[in-house]
Amino acid sequence: MKPIVVFLLFGFLAACAGYGLHRGSVTGVAGDGMYQFDREESPLGYTMVMAGKLTVLIFCLAEILHAMNLCDDPMALLRPLFG
């Protein structure tokens, strides 16, 4: 893909993950619908959902930096882990 497409796609995903992190930290509720975790009632579920969103945000930022040629390909680091 062209770098601008990668930049826009992962920029949108990073914005969504950032919004989810912000909303979850302000309201104290992570997830939605059947998989809704309250900070007080289910702290482990809340922490896992927020950690997943943070992982997505960090990966998106790494892909954005790669699209701007500021770092190496993050997928090249993950390929040996998955075969």
Image: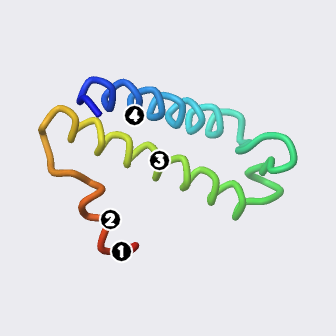
For label 3, the SS is helix
Count neighbours of disc 1 (C-alpha within 10 A) and say few if under 14, some if 14 to 19, many if 20 or more: few
- Mark drawn on residue 78: 2
Amino acid, disc 2: Leu
Q: Which mark is on residue 81? A: 1
- CB-based contact (under 8 Å), mark 1 and mark 2: yes
Q: Nearer the viewer, residue 68 or 46?
A: 68
Label 1 vs label 2: CA separation?
Answer: 5 Å
Instruction: State the separation of the CA atoms marked 4 and 2.
Output: 17 Å
Vertical relation: 20 (above or below) 52: above
Between the residue at mark 3 and the residue at mark 2, the CA separation in whole angstroms equals 14 Å
- Residue bearing mark 4: 10
Residue for point 32% across, 65% down: 78
> Along the polypeptide, which appears first: circle 1 or circle 3?
3
Residue bearing the label numbered 3: 56
In-front residue for pair 2/27:
2
